[in-house]
Image (cartoon, coloured by chain):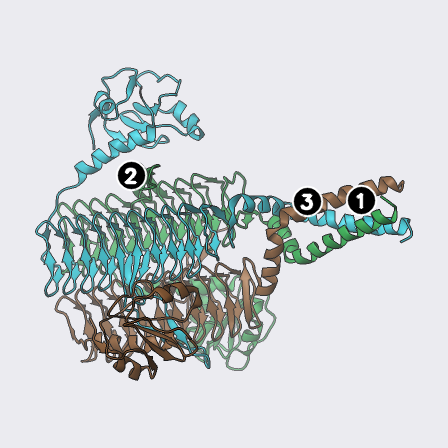
Chain colours: A brown, B cyan, C green
Amino acid sequence: MINFTVNQIAEIIQGEIIGSTDSSIFSFKPLETAEKGDLTFYYNEKYEQLFKNSQATCIIVSKTNESSPSTNQVYIKVDKPYEGFVKLLKIIDKEKKIGRCGVHASAVIGKNVTIHENVFVAPNCVIGDNCILKSGVELMPSVILYESVEIGNNSVINSNVTIYQEVKIGNNCIVHAGAVIGSDGFGYIENKFDGSFDKVPQLGNVILEDFVEIGANATIDRALIGSTIIRKGTKIDNLVHIAHNCEIGENNGIAAQTGISGSVSTGKRNRYGGQVGIAGHLEIADDVTILAQSGISKTIPNKGIYFGSPAKEHLKAFKIEAVLRRLPELNSEVERNSKEIIKLKEKIGD
Amino acid sequence: MINFTVNQIAEIIQGEIIGSTDSSIFSFKPLETAEKGDLTFYYNEKYEQLFKNSQATCIIVSKTNESSPSTNQVYIKVDKPYEGFVKLLKIIDKEKKIGRCGVHASAVIGKNVTIHENVFVAPNCVIGDNCILKSGVELMPSVILYESVEIGNNSVINSNVTIYQEVKIGNNCIVHAGAVIGSDGFGYIENKFDGSFDKVPQLGNVILEDFVEIGANATIDRALIGSTIIRKGTKIDNLVHIAHNCEIGENNGIAAQTGISGSVSTGKRNRYGGQVGIAGHLEIADDVTILAQSGISKTIPNKGIYFGSPAKEHLKAFKIEAVLRRLPELNSEVERNSKEIIKLKEKIGD
Amino acid sequence: MINFTVNQIAEIIQGEIIGSTDSSIFSFKPLETAEKGDLTFYYNEKYEQLFKNSQATCIIVSKTNESSPSTNQVYIKVDKPYEGFVKLLKIIDKEKKIGRCGVHASAVIGKNVTIHENVFVAPNCVIGDNCILKSGVELMPSVILYESVEIGNNSVINSNVTIYQEVKIGNNCIVHAGAVIGSDGFGYIENKFDGSFDKVPQLGNVILEDFVEIGANATIDRALIGSTIIRKGTKIDNLVHIAHNCEIGENNGIAAQTGISGSVSTGKRNRYGGQVGIAGHLEIADDVTILAQSGISKTIPNKGIYFGSPAKEHLKAFKIEAVLRRLPELNSEVERNSKEIIKLKEKIGD
């Protein structure tokens, strides 16, 4: 439950109030469910009808919006309505966070563990020998750290996460529930005679740099030797798989269920849609975007947008797709042409 | 271990006995492994050879089946053999279930938690402040509930599940092991200058209505604001991802590893094959079936069956696929035609 | 930290030393980061430049390699550099392993559980009634076993794994963190009138034979009746889904995020790339390889390599793909041909 006046909100997001200003806001809601007492936002014309019919007490809109609020309704005009709204969410989010610290009695702590006094360890966590938890770290219930794990300042690890030995997590990271960091890479030597597999010990580790976020049930395998690295600022969504010895560049955004095979290195500012697959040992340039469900089988040396499985430059892929959609007609046209040619040949006595 | 006579079974499933009736059944087995003392079922002609050679003591078959049981074997004829068999499984399943209740001493319970006297909380569960567990709820070992989670009557949550704050689960739901419900949506504002991401707080929740089942290691993200909703009767398989602010309609069936992007709404009775992907903000009509591995990039306003990535109406997709399979031959035909045309032009002195 | 002399290493891997032999090795590193004091290996020409510039003290190379080590650098020549390197890793891996045993006081053990004296049960494990843990089993923290689970000699189960009732795990298996074994198969009877689902109890189990490895957050569903079986020596990567009643053959290798639908049986020595999907009830022959992201919709009776969704024999698929890439040009050629034919027909007065 929140309680703001429209005036307070307009001040926070530095917006212009259109309509009566003495209303109070008790909740933030999406456009489709916002009612009296609620604040919402509108900028995507797709939802114009919802906007026009909205009973929300206050709507953050774009400066260029020319509509007028209904009776008992207020608009707040700003340059970027979504960004303004997020500013408010951040304030509420900050207020919600209780500065927790302390180690719950049920947590099991190994030998030679360093825990800063400002750390929160929830019930049923297990912390292996030689781990280091720096200031502001929060471990939610049932987080398991194997030996010699390091976690940097203010990083939050959610429940049922497993972090294998020697993994290093930077500052201000978030790891969501059920994620596994540092499991063995999928490495075997194949016995050519019977097709059996001989396991190759995976003796490297995983390094997450600062401001990395890892989604729920995502998995990041440890390196054979050396490190699997996720560079600063990269955000990884749920159920993503990063194989051993990958080096994922700075500020990548990797959507859900994408899988990146072993020893891939990606550039800066890559964007991966959902369910993308990348084959092993490839290098991806800076500023590459791969659209959802694409499969990358070759190194991508140049920035751009790619689509398809196997992927092509996206405009090329879209052109191919356009023809593909009329492939049966194309086929018929070819058959007709073939028949016409036979007739023509007969006609001219070929 | 079970112990039924053939007569008892025939009575339960209201079937007609063909053959000797005094045999006993000690186990239910699949057709390929059923032996003396076992009961099995047969209706799919694909497995006719297994059926004919089966040594099972009792086989549930269709009324239209005209074979005769071998010596010491009994058939029970019913309209729908599989449905009859499932009826038996349900009886055994019910008998197996022990009415468990009580809170294990190792569970850690927060402040102001409401637990009905008829609830089972297994070892090592952690229940956050202000949670509510209604009658018949079962939490298997190491279930973690953050604050203010509500779980309705008779819902079962399996081990190592994490449910984030404020999630509401209805009555008669099942959540399988390792699933994560209520993790943060993948929402960031991108800094255009350096491509870095600014996290948008995800302050909404997740609502599962009644009779929802969530598969092992599936993930359902909380809404930005408002709720991610899974409507009544919907069944979600393992490793499925549902992003923030989705509204999944009633009685959907979503097979393993499908991913649904943010703010998608689906109609009633949708069916999704495995590994389907749906792009963000789309609306899917009632009675839509999407075949496995398809990718949906546009709103689907009409019921039907769709296939492909990007998806087409399935009969169209199959026609395209038929031509695609002979694309090299089509290409050769076009090349031949082009050459013939040149020859024809030469011949007529063009 | 390790400490070998080059002589010791050459002896272990039976290699020929090229260069000075009195150096010491303190660490094993990948070619791109190895420096003074490090040992690395080289065999893939793709990394020739890294090899030539490497400052590693010792590099294991192929017998056929004709380069010379730089000053203060040693080569060790062997038939197979990677295999030689792995031999060293195995020695280090073995030394790292401490023979742990004992049951931690925080573990919760059910009734009638059999635990060999040589078993390690870490903190916060929960072991259901009637479980059997054989010699050398290791359960890492927060492993949950439901009732009547059996685990064979020397098998290791990592943290936050859930194993449902009656699952049998063979000898020398490894299950990585977060995996779920024995969750309910996705089985329902559909009510034709309202599209709702009636859950079919899943009363079978899962059997892992010896030397099986299961990746992090993978899921393997229990059978309806009978068993879902993973045969000897099969290795399954992270986030793979195996549905109910599958029988996965011996020595299969199944890469990350692949999904196998219900009642599929695979032959021996199958290889599945990442994100492959297989439809239900199919049979796959021995020695079949399916390339990444392929979708299998039909039984594969013959060994071979397959690609695409739906999959084709891979050479055929590559031929199709080659034409597909120039589909817009093919389309233009057809249009040109059609026009030429019209002109020809006019010309000859058709």
Q: Provide the secondary structure element on which disc 3 rests.
A: helix
Determine which residue is flagged by label 1: A341
Q: Which mark is residue C200?
A: 2
**Amino acid bearing label 1:** Ile
In the picture of the structure, the residue carrying the numbered disc 3 is A332
In the rendered view, does B23 fall on the left or right side of A244? left
Residue occupying image coordinates x 15% and y 55%: B133
From mark 1 to mark 3, how far is it between C-alphas? 14 Å
Type of amino acid under label 2:
Val
Estimate the x, y position of residue C4 in percent, counting from the top left: 39, 73
Q: Position of residue C230 (x, y in %)?
A: 37, 45
Quarter of the N terminus of chain A within the rendering: bottom left
**Residue C36 horizontal/vertical position (percent):** 45, 80
Q: Residues within 10 Å of mark 2 (few under 14, many from 20)?
A: many
Mark 1 neighbour class, 10 Å CA radius: few under 14, some 14 to 19, many 20 or more: many
Task: In this rendered view, identify the residue nearer to me: A4 or A293.
Answer: A4
Q: Chain of mark 3?
A: A
